[in-house]
Amino acid sequence: MSTSLPIAPLRVVQITDLHLKTAPGAQLWGVDVDASLDAVLGRIEARHPDADFVLVTGDLVGDEPAAYVRLRQRLAVLDKPVYCLPGNHDFPAAMSRILRDSPVQRARHVVTDHWQFVLLDSSFPGTPDGHLAYGELAFLDTLLVSSSDWHTMICLHHNPVPSQTSWLDTMMVSNHAALFGILDRYPQVRAVVWGHLHAEFNSWRNGVQLLGTPATCVQFKPRAPEPLVDDAPPGYRWFELYPDGALHTGVERVG
């Protein structure tokens, strides 16, 4: 009698909206961004030591490009690859330059045995609004048309669908129809993940899972008409990704 052994999944952790400053102990909406990040990283080290890599989906720093030096140092404690993309409080050129030749790096495309990750830049210079430039959409389309064998996760900073939090939805990806016009053509797309909301979000669209992840710092109250701080603690999202395309995920918060 033969016994089927379970296939080990790819394990990925997503963190987002760190808002690090150059000065230690800086606060955002009353939350110490360093202390809250330390709590999240400590939980990841304790509960996910076998994670294959970490995704950071934007707003790594809080409008201070020199803070990428501190970011690189802080995330090095994870002792695993960390792949980053920019958000509206980031500086893409400085991010790429300062994180070059480091385990913590800006990335656009990550490929494993059965899964690929497309990291898009939805930031738009001079505004907090989300937008995917023509080059980003063309990059995505080119990858998807040539990689039908890989299950695919699309990663960006801004939410591409309404979150029902009206003040944040004014900043969602403005050309989301163009994004989904591409994704709808490729059945290998399994999930779209983002940050920006400082809150958890879960939905589905045409068989694709849509996932927003809490910030490592302050949390915003969902479905509020104006910015309100939520009393939920900071958190992160974990993924287990299987060779057959199955995706298991959950949010962990550090109380």
Image: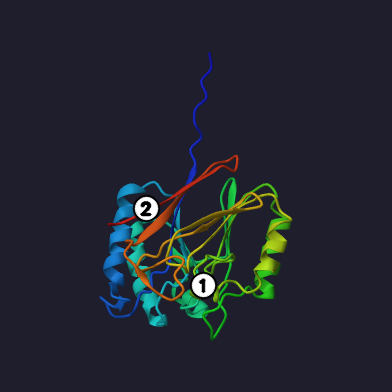
Q: Which of 90 and 166 is in front in this view?
A: 166
Q: What residue type is labelled 2?
A: Glu
Label 1 or label 2, whichever lies nearer to me, is: 1
How many numbered marks have been drawn onto this rendered protein structure?
2
Sort mark 2 into few (<14), some (14-19) or many (20+) by Cα contacts within 10 Å. Answer: some
Q: Which of 101 and 156 is in front in this view?
A: 156
Q: Where is residue 161 in the image (x, y as percent from the top left)?
A: 59, 64
Query: SS of the residue at dot 2?
Result: strand
Q: Where is residue 196 in the image (x, y as percent from the top left)?
A: 47, 69
Query: SS of the residue at dot 1?
Result: helix
- Locate residue 218 relative to residue 136 in the image: left or right: left
- Locate residue 231 relative to residue 120 in the image: left or right: left
Residue holding disc 1: 166
Q: Quadrant location of the C terminus?
A: bottom left
Q: Position of residue 251 (x, y in %)?
A: 41, 53
Image: 206 above or below 167: above
How are the residues colored?
Answer: rainbow
Q: Which amino acid does label 1 sit on?
A: Ser
Q: How far apart are marks 1 and 2 (CA)?
A: 25 Å
Given the current orientation, which residue lies at the most extreme bottom position?
Answer: 126
Residue holding disc 2: 252
Based on the displayed image, in which of its 4 quarters is residue 143 positioned? bottom right
Sort mark 1 into few (<14), some (14-19) or many (20+) by Cα contacts within 10 Å. Answer: some
Note whether residue 151 is visible: yes
Q: Residue 157 carries which label?
A: none
Based on the displayed image, in which of its 4 quarters is residue 22 positioned? bottom left
Residue in the image at 68% along x and 58% along y:
183
Residue in the image at 34% along x and 62% along y:
234
Given the current orientation, which residue lies at the most extreme top position?
Answer: 1
- Locate residue 3 relative to residue 133 in the image: left or right: left
* First reached walking from the N terminus: tag 1 or tag 2: 1
Note whether residue 139 is visible: no
